Each structure stands twice: as structure tokens, then as C-alpha cells.
Amino acid sequence: MSIKSTKGFATLKSKHSYCTLQDRGRKAFTALAVPMGGPMDQHAFDMANGLLCNGDEDSVLEIAAQELILQFSKSTRVAWVAGPGEVLVNGTEVRSSIIEINAGDEIKFCYARTFTWRYLAIEGGWKGELVLGSRSTMLSLGMPALQYLGRLQYNAKPVEGDLPLSLASYVPAVHDIPIFPGPDFHYLQTVDVKNYFTNALTIDAQSNRHAYKLKEKITVLKYPTNFESVGCVPGMVQLTPSGDLFVLMKDAQTTGGYLQVFFIAPDQLALLAQRLLGSRVKFQFLTSE
């Protein structure tokens, strides 16, 4: 006889967390100026869902580098992808990446020390509101990030049987990130670009899901006063008149008002996203040559 699921809720108990609900996003609506959304790191997202044998479309909680505490109202199972020693249950460090949760339990993600975006999956997926075919958080669609004392719904059922020890060993690759000329690259001098990418660059601490800013400015000899605004996709790197570079991320706008001078491929964009804010990253500038 099957056991009927009941509604459970996880309540955010920390005031300065930033976490959002993510699935695979809204790729079919960019022509309507709706950003793609979706996880900053697709591989880590898939790993969290896979630990629980969830479906590919099940929603996962994406947790930024700040501390986060969730309290659960009903028993369930969760799986996490985070750095070593960053996850506690009721104050005790957990070794397994699949955890049995009982009513009243608290799970804590400590401040990130290994990579920026951590993921918490729940058996059957989180049950957020479905908007334009997706549960991915999007403020412009009336879907804000989870607030202090806010609640996330899930389908709870009694946990039965022993749970095997399972450790998700996940460390994002660390290497020079390839970066290519973008459609507006001709506004820059190639020699200046090569000099710019000689040294490692710093990810600004104010970077977010919309864009990652590079602290170091690039030389701009002549910025055009008029040019056509074109479509934007995650991975495009925009240049402001003052020489600031912004790498567009998953929640970026779909059209832009700045020059798009570089491009980072999607499979490499997640590696940039997972670098800790304030850290330095080395790019490998590649041309058609």
C-alpha cells in the first residue's frame, strides 16, 4: 500500500541569506524580453537532483555564498551539493550528501568557502509557483527570492528504510577560462586586449545572477555615440564607456545598451559563476587565428 504524501514547509530562519528556486529556466521566452533564468551551475544542479532520483525538471533551491538556515515542518529526504564541511543538521556536520530530515530539524549552509553557488534538492522537487512553464525565481514576473520567515512547500512522507552513505564529491574545475571576441570586438585594439588578459582579473564583490563585473578596466579609445541595440544571451561580455566589463549571467536582460565585445561559452560560464566573489580568475583570450 502506498503512503499518501502530505504538505510540508521549509522556513527560512536566517535574515541575510540569498536563495532562489531554480529549474531549467524559460528559454522559449527571450523574444518577449523574459530572461532565461535557471541554475548558475547546471552540473551541480543535476547532481543534487540525481542523488534523489528526481526528474530533470524538478526544482532545486540555489543558495548563494551567505549563511542559510532552513527549518522543516515534516519528514523528508534532501540532497545537497556544497563545499566540504559547509552543511550542518541541528548543529552537527553531516558527512553524507543525502540526508533524512525529521519534523523540526534545521539544516544550515555555512558561508561558502569552496565555490559560490550551492544546491539543495528535496525528494520530489520543491513546489514553487509555475510561471511561463518554469518555477525559476524571477522578480520581474512577481517571483522574489525567498525572504526571512518565508516558506517553501514540498510533498512530505514518512522516511522508511536505511539510507546509504552517499557523498557528492564536487569541485568545479579551475583553469584559464576561454574568452572569445564578441560582435562588437572591432571597437577595441587587439594589442590592448592581449595586454589586459595577461594578468588574472578580479570578480567584483557586487556581482550577482544578472552579471559578474570585472574590477579591472579595459582601455577604450573611442566609444561610439550611436549603435544598434542587439539581443543578449548569458555569456556575452558588455563594455561600458568608462571601460567596465560585465559578464552577463543567467538572469541577464535579453537586449542590451552596451557594446558586446567578448563572449564566454555556456559550459565555461558555470566555472566563472562558481569562483568566489572577490577572487581572481585568469582568462585565455582566443581569436579565430
Image (cartoon, rainbow, N blue to C red):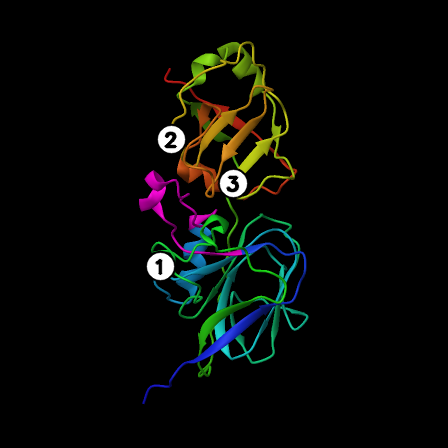
- Which residue is labeled 3 in the image? 210
Task: Determine whether the residue tagged by mark 2 lies in a helix, strand or loop.
Answer: loop
Q: Dot 2 corresponds to which residue?
A: 231
Spatial CA span between label 3 and label 1:
22 Å
The residue lying toward the viewer, choosing from 78 and 57, is: 57
Residue drawn at (52%, 44%) of the image: 209
Q: Is residue 126 magenta?
A: no
Whether residue 185 sits left or right of residue 118 in the image: it is left
Q: How much space separates mark 2 and mark 3, taking CA atoms?
A: 15 Å
Magenta-highlighted residues: 20-42
User: Who's the residue at 67% across and 56% down the image?
Assistant: 16
Which of the two labelled residues, at mark 1 and mark 2, occupies the earlier sequence position? 1
- Residue to which mark 1 is pinned: 57
How many C-alpha atoms fall within 10 Å of the one at disc 2: few (<14), some, or many (≥20)?
Answer: some
Coordinates of residue 264 in the picture (x, y in percent) = 44, 31
Name the residue nearer the viewer: 135 or 278.
135
Q: Does the magenta stretch include residue 38?
A: yes
Q: Are marks 1 and 2 in contact (CB under 8 Å)?
A: no
| Type of the residue with mark 1 | Glu
